[in-house]
Image: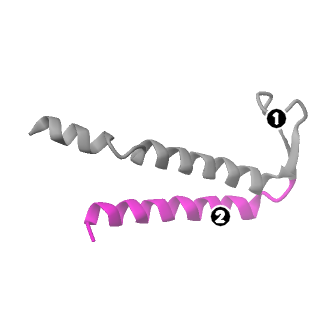
Amino acid sequence: MNAKIFFRTLGFLLILLLVILISTENIQQIDFHFSLLRDKPVRAPAAFVYFALFAVGVVGGTLLHGGGSGGAAGSSRSKK
C-alpha cells in the first residue's frame, strides 16, 4: 500500500469521525432552505442534514478527482 493513500484514508476517517461527533450533538429538528430545489423548507434532524451535505461533498470530490478514464492517461501520454 502506498503511504500517500494510507494518509489520505486516515485523514478521511478523521473527518468522518468529526461528522459523527457533530451529528451526535445536534439532534434537534431544523428547517433547511434550498430554494433551487424546493419552495418549502425541509424539516429534518440537524445530524441528517449535516451528514447529507458531507456526503454530497465526498461524492462530488470523488467525481472530480477520478472523473473520467481518459483524463490522467491522456496527460501522461502527452508528456512522453
Q: Residue at x 24, y 39 (%)?
A: 74
Q: Which mark is residue 3?
A: none
| Relative vertical location of residue 51 with respect to residue 14 in this rendering, above or below | above
SS type, badge 2:
helix
Reply yes or no: does residue 15 show up in magenta: yes
Q: Residue at x 26, y 66 (%)?
A: 2
Q: Nearer the viewer, residue 59 or 33?
A: 59
Q: Residue at x 68, y 55 (%)?
A: 51
- Highlighted range, magenta: 1-28
Residue identified by numbered label 2? 20
Crowding near the residue tagged with mark 1, few <14, some 14–19, many ≥20 C-alpha atoms within 10 Å = few
Q: Is residue 12 left or right of residue 33?
A: left
Q: How is the image coloured?
A: one colour
Q: Are marks 1 and 2 in contact (CB under 8 Å)?
A: no
SS type, badge 1:
loop
| Relative vertical location of residue 4 with respect to residue 64 in this rendering, above or below | below
Q: Is residue 16 left or right of residue 42?
A: left
Reply yes or no: does residue 7 show up in magenta: yes
Q: Position of residue 80 (x, y in %)?
A: 8, 39
Indicate the quadrant where residue 67 lies.
Answer: top left
Q: Residue at x 76, y 55 (%)?
A: 48
Residue identified by numbered label 1? 33
Residue flagged by tag 1: what amino acid is it?
His
Q: Position of residue 72 (x, y in %)?
A: 28, 43
How many angstroms separate mark 1 from mark 2 (CA)? Answer: 23 Å
